[in-house]
Amino acid sequence: MTEDEKYMRRCIQLAKNGRQNAKPNPMVGAVIVSADDRIIGEGYHVRCGEGHAEVNAFASVSAEDEVLLPESTIYVSLEPCSHYGKTPPCADLIIKKGVRRVVVGCIDEFAEVQGRGIRKLREAGIEVEVGVLEKECKELNRRFFTFHREKRPFIILKWAQTANGFIDDNYMPMQISSAFTKMLSHKLRAEEDAILVGRVTEERDHPQLTVREWTGPDPKRLVIDHAHPLNLDSLHAHGIQSLIVEGGTKTLASFIQQGLWDEIRVETNLQKTVTDGTRAPQLPANAEVVSTHHDGCNTIVRYRRII
């Protein structure tokens, strides 16, 4: 691991602290390192409408360390903004503070930025390096990037199945998740903006779709059927950046067939089998395993879409 990668990992770690309150802005972390390889400031974007990561990092620098800034490097997980929004441009602040070097994790795909922040810094004579841990930095804000690039929410398909591939027991609801994996499901709900099921699931199972085993806000509840189809443009217009689909096989399969998914999470109870019922959806051919989590006899596999 290089020195730049070490400090960028710290940026990512800091950025995750803003998971709940930074929305709809991206999560961003910043670390300021002096020439003698000492962290003299760090911060993250705490809450939308308040100071960005760079602002908070500079604010944390002590009065005696201010003199070290001209020979220091600031690491930022996302390109510094160059436009006036609810706060002034961070690129201007970096230039004003006079740091020697800026290391950026990834370029901001938001239309108001898209390389303009980096260009402004370079035009001011600051050395800028881009792309350190780029994959990890993009992964951190995959919802934000998808929302602005695709003009739709980041879509997560999710289901639980038996060892022999059924999502229910002879068409009746059954408990497949463990207490721990159920808690993880509620944690996911607290992190996403909306959750969707089909009409049949709504009428048959009466799912609460709330955050009961975790802390945080309940996602917006959506139910679709032929008379009330999903309108992605409407979700985008309402600022919904992420959507969990927890419907039955028919609803899930319709998203897969249309290519409307970014991530799939499948929980399998390796000890439960049934004689008949509703078959789980078929995974698409372009699904790539990202991670696998085990909890006793339950396994959760997370897939991402290969473009």
Image: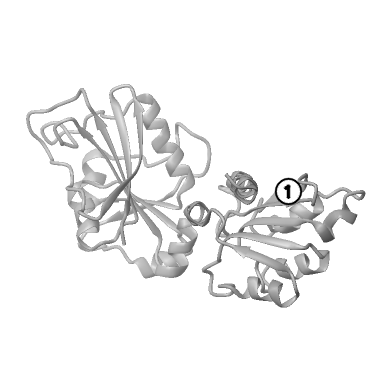
Location of the N terminus (image quadrant): top right
Badge 1 element: strand
Is residue 64 rendered to the left or right of residue 14? right
Q: Residue furthest left?
A: 275
- For the residue marked with disc 1, what is the amino acid? Glu
Occupied quadrant, residue 306: bottom left
At which x and y percent is residue 59? Answer: 81, 53
Q: Residue furthest right?
A: 64
Q: Taking the image as drawn, is residue 163 in sight? A: yes
> For mark 1, what is the residue?
42
At which x and y percent is residue 224? Answer: 27, 57
Near-viewer residue (58 or 67)? 67
At which x and y percent is residue 174? Answer: 22, 30
Location of the C terminus (image quadrant): bottom left
Q: Taking the image as drawn, is residue 79 in sight? A: no
In percent of the image, x 33 and y 25: which residue is there?
178
In percent of the image, x 7 and y 29: which residue is there?
275
* Label total for image: 1
In percent of the image, x 45 and y 53: which residue is there?
193
Q: Classify mark 1: residues with Cα within 10 Å, few (<14), some (14-19) or many (20+).
A: many
Q: Is residue 19 above or below residue 269?
A: below
Occupied quadrant, residue 79: bottom right
Is residue 49 rendered to the left or right of residue 290? right
